[in-house]
Amino acid sequence: MNKIKLSLPAALAAGALMFAAASAFAADTIVDTAMEGCKVELDTWCKDVTPGEGRILSCLAAREDKLSGRCEYALYQASVQLEAFVSAIQHVATECKTDLEKSCANIEPGGGRLGQCLKKNEATVTPACKQAMADTKMEVE
């Protein structure tokens, strides 16, 4: 459990910054993984907790010694999904750095705006950027 406890807060902190810039589908999938696996714990101990700002995760962490194996595994799976999600965003950002500076310099980060800018300018972005977007199956709404 210690590995889960240490990796989740760090991953969730990074993910909180990234979710605003990425597809809602990926965020929902990660949250759904944890919510489904920890349904019993959430319904038992955290039903009155207002979602947001890590309060539900804190509720679970406060009872980490009582979590079922299923919940522990779901939290681990969510952290793995989040890590892959963040790595994909980092890959696109690295490969598209020049394109972002050239075509999207005046775009405020967040809310998927940089991804939308890259998609809008897809015809002129570098081959490396196009490949990174294809590799990560970057979807922009």
Image (cartoon, rainbow, N blue to C red):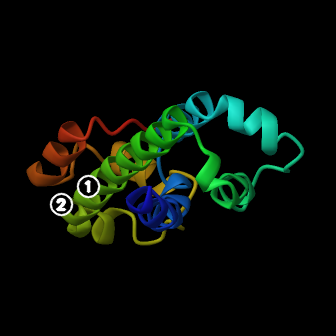
Check disc 1: other Cα within 10 Å, few if <14, some if 14-19, many if 20+.
Answer: many
Labels 1 & 2 near each other (Cβ < 8 A): yes
Instruction: Label 2, secondary structure: give it.
Output: helix
Label 2 amino acid? Glu
Q: Residue at image x 49%, y 65%?
A: 107
- The answer to whether 35 appears left or right of 137 in the picture is right
- Residue 90: which quarter of the image? bottom left
Hey, which residue is sitting farthest right in the picture?
A: 48
Q: Which residue is mark 2?
A: 95
Of the numbered discs in the image, which one, if any, rests on residue 74? none
- The answer to whether 103 appears left or right of 31 in the picture is left
Q: Residue at image x 43%, y 62%?
A: 2
User: In this view of the protein, which residue sits in the foreground, 41 or 24?
Assistant: 41
Task: Quarter of the image for the N terminus: give it.
Answer: bottom left
Q: Height in image: 9 above or below 74?
A: below
User: In this view of the protein, which residue sits in the foreground, 121 or 6?
Assistant: 6
Label 1 amino acid? Val
Check disc 2: other Cα within 10 Å, few if <14, some if 14-19, many if 20+.
Answer: some
User: In this view of the protein, which residue sits in the foreground, 113 or 78?
Assistant: 78
Q: Residue at image x 21%, y 69%?
A: 98
Expressed as whole percent of the image width and height from the top left, the position of residue 103 reads: 33, 63
Q: Which residue is mark 1?
A: 92
Expressed as whole percent of the image width and height from the top left, the position of residue 94 reads: 22, 65
User: In this view of the protein, which residue sits in the foreground, 68 or 92?
Assistant: 68
Q: Residue at image x 51%, y 51%?
A: 112
Total count of labels? 2
Expressed as whole percent of the image width and height from the top left, the position of residue 141 reads: 51, 35
Instruction: Label 1, secondary structure: give it.
Output: helix
- Residue 131: which quarter of the image? top left
Hey, which residue is sitting farthest front in the picture?
A: 65
